[in-house]
Amino acid sequence: MAITHWATTRTEEQLVSDAKKLFTATYDEEPTGVWAAPGRVNLIGDHVDYAEGICLPFALEQLTAVAASGRNDNLVNIVTIMPGQEEPRTLSISLDEVGKGNPATWAGYIVGVIWALNSANALVCKTGLDLAVVSDVPVGSGLSSSAALECSTALAAVEVKGASFKKMAMYPVMVEATMRAENDVVGASTGGLDQRTSFYGKPNQALEIDFLYDEFSFVPCNFDDHGLALLIADTNAPHRLIDGQYGSRRGLIDEVTAVLRKEDSTFRDYKVDQILEKLAKTPECSDHDLYRRRVGHIINETRRTQQAVTLLREGDFTKFGKLMTESHVSLRDDYEVVTPELDGAVNAALSAGALGARMTGGGFGGSIIALVKKEDLESTAAAIAEAAETRGFAEPTFLHAKPSEGARRLV
Ligand code: ADP
Ligand code: MG
């Protein structure tokens, strides 16, 4: 029997203590405070955030915590211990050096946020910070450790440096700044789902985010009350959004969006065939079958997500699970972002009796989710681990995902 590895989840108190310890060991003084933001998991609605679609994520219990103090010069000093690692990484950079494409490394997610907040005139005091970061959000697993890092940094910067806007107005400004850090500074063209969820998450609630109207609402989501659990299996196959695959999917959809915008319409106004008719007139659309599958995913996934929201509200988890699995098939066959590791894990979960299972996040590696009976949580994890071992894949890591609170100050 393969061993199942569960991700470390520290209590808030442990995270605060670890963040403070790292801060004082590095900077030789106590931090002003400790702020935190969670990773997120998307229940359904993937690769539609950049296509005016709908997604249904919730904030995870697992947090990235940032201990912070202000500085009077332009330096940002960072020390971070990544989940599962012991050796800290450090970097010291002047805010004058930060801008588009620089630094396009892990530090860009942090200093990019401060730079973007300054560009938006959101901070009263535009100088640097000392930061110490500890995290339980698995990195590069499709659970958005990047947003957890950006959102905790944004909140820390705003509270340490002073906010130029009223509290409620700060949230949209922070969402924008965290997106700019990711899009402009690091150069990852992601669409804003992650940051909204990390900021706005609530216990026992999922967020229905509608990217056409740029609005969201809460949907009650408490699997536990219904004898169910959401299992995340991180395949530990690296997910690389910065390589060309994400860009090529997005590029095609952006092209179609531009055609639709010319006549002031959206993906939601048409069936696939109607869009293909419009595209037939454009020189770019030479590979008809490719466009049919890619556009088909966008249209069907948004419709599925709308249905899933209704089913979640009604508590019909059998049908909800079926939609999860349909979504996986669409991402595999039409959008082609599913790796053998992801597909193997989904099949293992379904064979073990899951109500539904799918890859989650950007794909090309990362995690799957499976909706299972509470008592089947361990055995489903064991079945997934077993299947990975049989095929010679990396050992997966598991999390029991519970809808939790968004970004906040811990102390
Ligand atoms: P995901 O957001 O799904 O975890 P991404 O590729 O978007 O995957 O973001 C992962 C990257 O974010 C890491 O490779 C690293 O550069 C950065 N990152 C995430 N968490 C941390 C952390 N705690 N400390 C430093 N960098 C981090
Ligand atoms: Mg990310």
Image (spheres, rainbow, N blue to C red):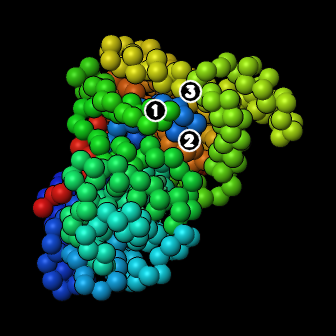
Q: Residues within 10 Å of mark 1 (few under 14, many from 20)?
A: few
Q: Nearer the viewer, mark 2 or mark 1?
A: 1
Tell us which disc is closer to us: 1 or 3: 1
In 3D space, how far apart are the residues under numbered discs 1 and 3 (Cα atoms)? 17 Å
Would residue 332 be seen by someone viewing this image from the given angle?
Answer: no
Q: Residues within 10 Å of mark 2 (few under 14, many from 20)?
A: many
Left or right: 383, with 12 as reference point:
right
The quadrant in which the N terminus is found is top left
Residue at position x 75%, y 19% in the image: 273
Query: In the rendered image, which residue does mark 3 sit on?
Result: 301
Give above or below for 106 relative to 168. Answer: below
Q: Position of residue 41 (x, y in %)?
A: 40, 41
Q: Earlier in the sequence, mark 2 or mark 1?
A: 2
Separation of disc 2 and disc 3 at Cα? 13 Å
Residue at image position (44%, 14%) is: 319
- Element type where label 2 sits in the image: helix
Q: Earlier in the sequence, mark 1 or mark 3?
A: 1
* Residue under numbered circle 1: 213
Q: Amino acid at mark 2?
A: Tyr
Identify which residue, 162 or 37, lies in the foreground: 162
Comparing marks 2 and 3, which lies closer to the viewer?
2
Distance from disc 2 to disc 1, alpha carbons, whole Å, reads: 12 Å
Query: Crowding near pointer 3: few (<14 within 10 Å), some, many (20+)?
Result: many
Residue that mark 2 sits on? 50
Percent x, y for residue 143?
42, 48
- Residue 299 in view, yes or no: yes
- Mark 3 belongs to which amino acid? Glu
Tell me where residue 36 sits by quadrant: bottom left
- Report the amino acid beneath label 1: Tyr
Q: Earlier in the sequence, mark 2 or mark 3?
A: 2
Q: Is residue 128 left or right of residue 307?
A: left
Secondary structure found at label 1: loop
